[in-house]
Image (cartoon, rainbow, N blue to C red):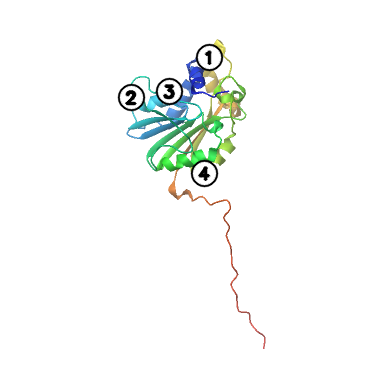
Amino acid sequence: MYHSIYDFKDFYNSPMGGVVKHVLRRKIRGYWDNVKDLRVVGIGYTQPYLDMFAEEAERCICVNPAEQGSYPWPANGRNLSVLAEETELPIETNSIDRVILIHSLEFAELPKSNLQEIFRILKSNGRLIVLAPNRRGMWARAEWAPFGHGTPYSADQLKSLLRDNLFVYEQSCTALYVPPFRWNVVRRTFEYFETVMPYIVPAIGGVHMVEVSKQVYSGTAIPADSRIIVRARPVAAPVST
């Protein structure tokens, strides 16, 4: 079980972890090709992905879940990582332009509360990318990898969860078609799998990636116990003569 942040670190330092990082970084960068002067926050275990924005963004912060631990990041320079409860982020309201959520939602005890907290810190035009294991994918069954733990999602489940928390859908894709086998031949041919398999068996990709935005006009949450009461108004009826 991936209890510690060092379990994630060991995975990404492995040869197959390097392949996963390369594939997902390319997908994320394809969605956000320019974050110049923006504030970017990564929640979960995002160190392998945030460094590609660190020099470009106005500010780049990594938030690690309290139960998993944290370590200084980046290796060289001032520390930009923090340990926090995902339901109580130490970040000002309406202050963040972009949020990346990976290795987080599938482990969350209160996923709705976590998403509500992200909604709070995002600016009115802010955007969120969520990466979560695909319920149908092979990586959700690979217990030696982080995607094989926690609660996997189908594409519809992930989109519904985000919509229920007032996020507006923008775009999505499925990634990580390379099989979760730690064989040299698989690592050497991962580009073939990522290019060809989406056209043959698109449903088996290992990770769902969904981008959503915060739109303040998207609605206001209604408490589950609220009720609308309609009171009948007396109406005069005609009287026969």
N-terminal-most mark, 2 or 4: 2
Describe the element under mark 4 as helix, strand or loop.
loop
User: Where is mark 3, residue-wise?
Assistant: 71
Mark 3: few, some, or many residues within 10 Å (few <14, many ≥20)? Answer: some
Q: Give the Cα distance between marks 2 and 1.
A: 34 Å
The amino acid pointed to by label 1 is: Arg
Task: For the residues labelled 1 and 4, say whether their Cβ atoms are less than 8 Å apart.
Answer: no
Tell me: 138 left or right of 51: right
Q: Give the Cα distance between marks 2 and 4.
A: 34 Å
Is residue 33 visible in the rendered image? The answer is no
The amino acid pointed to by label 3 is: Tyr
Can you tell which mark lies on residue 165? 4
Where residue 229 sits, quadrant-wise, is bottom right
Q: What residue do we see at 51% from left, 50% from top?
A: 221
Q: Give the Cα distance between marks 1 and 4.
A: 38 Å
N-terminal-most mark, 3 or 4: 3
Q: What residue do we see at 39% from left, 30% from top?
A: 61
N-terminal-most mark, 1 or 4: 4
N-terminal-most mark, 2 or 3: 3
The amino acid pointed to by label 2 is: Arg
Q: Give the Cα distance between marks 2 and 3.
A: 12 Å
N-terminal-most mark, 1 or 3: 3
Of tags 2 and 4, the one toward the viewer is 2
Describe the element under mark 1 as helix, strand or loop.
helix
Q: Nearer the viewer, residue 91 or 149?
A: 91
N-terminal-most mark, 2 or 1: 2
Is residue 15 visible in the rendered image? The answer is yes
Of tags 2 and 1, the one toward the viewer is 2
User: Where is mark 2, residue-wise?
Assistant: 78
User: Where is mark 1, residue-wise?
Assistant: 187
The amino acid pointed to by label 4 is: Asn
